[in-house]
Amino acid sequence: MSRRMVVAIAVLAALAAAVAYQRIRPLELPVARTETDVPVQVFGLGTVEARVLSRVGFEVGGVLVALLADHGDLVAAGSELARLDSAAQQVSLEKAEAGVVQARAALTRAEAGLQRATAVEAQRRQANARRQELRARGATSAEAAEDAAAELAIAEAELALARAEVEVAAAALVDAEAVARAEAVRLAQHRLLAPYEALVVARHREAGDVATPGQPVFTLVDARSFWALAHVDEAVAGGIALGQAAEVRLRSLPGAVFHGRVARIGIESDRVTEERAVYVACEVCPAEVHLGEQAEVTITKGRLESALLVPEAAVAMTGTATGMVWTIENGRLSRREVGLGARLLDGRVAITNGLPDGALVVSRIEPGMREGRSAVAREPPS
């Protein structure tokens, strides 16, 4: 046998020994460790919105003669925002007020007539009583007694008429006052007032424009009602509750974190995206808020006192809450189906059951793994 052949055989033998060693040597594998006080969080992407948003305009039409607020202004409740030309309506109000004066005078005249009719009726009643007494004694004629009774009946009728005239005049005064109030309300509708303390988001019209009833002139928001609307996947939305702590990050302020609480949870999920709407109100809001800005929301649903966490990449799912994992048991690799619990934002999932005592769960799949092969836990770096 030549020397070259001997060397080749030796090299092959060495390679075979190396391969055999690699196949039988114990694998050093990273394993999952039990952790304590683990926050369970969910993530939602959404936008900045306002709970109270109003598009305000006039109830009547007219020409805009004044706009007293603009984009970005903070206006007090009841402050004037805009005004319509009200000259014609002012005339209508003055005419209605004159009608009230006229109706009040008519009522006064009717009341005076009632007083006169009351006095006349009392006088005629006394005269009739005297004539009837004299007739009974034979001291006057029957004709005179009959005339006195007729005069009393006329006085009573005139008294009833006077009372009716007072009622008519009183009703006319009430109607005139109602017309005046209606005209005053219409005049007030020529001024647009802020319904609450608000931030002006947009001004839609300018001075000189003709405003139609109901047409928005301003868009207002209650500056205290800003919140983040997050869309959370239904698969992880279970367990979200009102009052839970949340963190909000705005696209324009990537380095800032704003803390808040869950303020509302949508009752109806989106049937297309399969997401649930969750609203988070900030506890300390940013100095400037922009409606529609992208917001990243992280909600803490709870905390795990103690949990064995394994990356989802190391789990072969067998159901919605079960999966197969590699374990090290008595120095050998094995496969186990385990129960799965909470999923974390970092891609790890909690194992809830299915492990025998002393079993270690492999946290990363590596080449050469097979059931029964020798394996040891790799110590984490210090």
Image (spheres, rainbow, N blue to C red):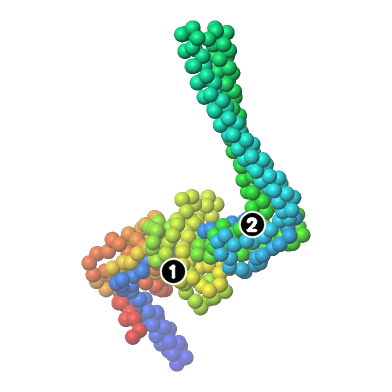
Please state if 29 lies on the left or on the right of 65 as rendered: left
Any part of residue 332 in sight: no
Quadrant position of residue 63: bottom right
Q: Secondary structure at mark 1?
A: loop
- Residue nearest the observer in this picture, 328 or 47: 47
The C terminus: image quadrant: bottom left
Q: Which residue is mark 1?
A: 283
Identify the secondary structure beneath mark 2. Answer: strand
Q: Which residue is depicted at the point 64% across and 61% down?
A: 81
Give, as a three-letter code, the residue at label 2. Leu
Identify the disc placed on residue 312. none
Q: Let me know if residue 101 appears in the view.
A: yes
Q: Position of residue 121 (x, y in %)?
A: 54, 23
Q: Residue at x 51, y 73 (%)?
A: 286
Foreground disc of the pair 2, 1: 2
Identified at 52% across, 58% down, the residue is 51
Q: Position of residue 313 (x, y in %)?
A: 43, 68
Q: Residue 106's x, y, as percent?
A: 64, 36
Q: Nearer the viewer, residue 357 or 373?
A: 357
Q: Nearer the viewer, residue 332 or 36?
A: 36
| Above-or-below relation of 178 to 355 | above
Marks 2/1: CA distance?
A: 32 Å
Residue 273, image x and y in percent?
A: 54, 55
- Identify the residue position indicated by label 2 in the image: 192
Q: Earlier in the sequence, mark 2 or mark 1?
A: 2
Mark 1 packing: few (<14 Cα in 10 Å), some, or many (20+)?
Answer: few
Name the kind of residue labelled 1 in the image: Glu
- Rendered view: 381 above or below 123: below
> In the visual, does 31 lie left or right of 49?
left
Would you say the residues marked 2 and 1 are in contact, meaning their CB atoms lie under 8 Å apart?
Answer: no
